Amino acid sequence: MHSFSLLARDSEQSAYGLVGRFWQSDFGLRPCTDDETFRAFSEPGVARLLMIFRCQPIAHGKTLLLTETRVHCPDRASRLAFTPYWLAIRPVSGLIRQRMLRSVRARAEG
């Protein structure tokens, strides 16, 4: 998460963004420091990734932490490059997300 930029935060959710060619060995990251830069970014062949963490209150004072990831590929070339990358990384991405959520839970319950 160290490369992500905080785009928005309120009492119930946080949104982080990353811009790049994630399918490249160096991820082809582009500068993105805030929400305005993220929303305005439109370089052909470069994708934008949005990761949202949302807290949802549930029974007995507990909170459910939900995550959502969205990727925007602005053109055919970026979609064609991103698709095989996503198919390869998706299982590992799920494992990383589970590990991250376990870490958050351990800290919250700590």
Image (cartoon, rainbow, N blue to C red):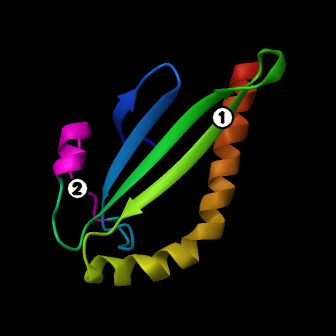
- For the residue carrying disc 1, how many other residues have a C-alpha within 10 Å: few (<14), some (14-19), or many (20+)? some
Q: Is the residue 65 above or below the residue 3 in the image?
A: above
Question: Can residue 34 be seen?
Answer: no
Q: Looking at the picture, tell me which residue is in the foreground, 61 or 1.
A: 61
Taking 31 as reference, is 4 left or right?
Answer: right
Residue of label 2 = 30
Q: Quadrant of the C terminus?
A: top right
* Distance CA(mark 2)–CA(mark 1): 29 Å
Question: Residue at 58% across / 44% down in the picture?
Answer: 67
Q: Residue furthest top?
A: 61
Tell me the amino acid under the disc marked 1.
Leu
Local secondary structure at mark 2: loop
Tell me the amino acid under the disc marked 2.
Arg
Locate residue 71, reporting x and y percent: 40, 61
Taking 26 as reference, is 34 left or right?
Answer: left
Question: Residue at 67% across / 40% down in the picture?
Answer: 101
| Badge 2 or badge 1: first in the primary sequence | 2
Q: Quadrant of residue 66?
A: top right
Locate residue 13, reporting x and y percent: 50, 30
Locate residue 21, reporting x and y percent: 31, 68
In the image, which residues are magenta? 28-40
Locate residue 4, reporting x and y percent: 38, 44
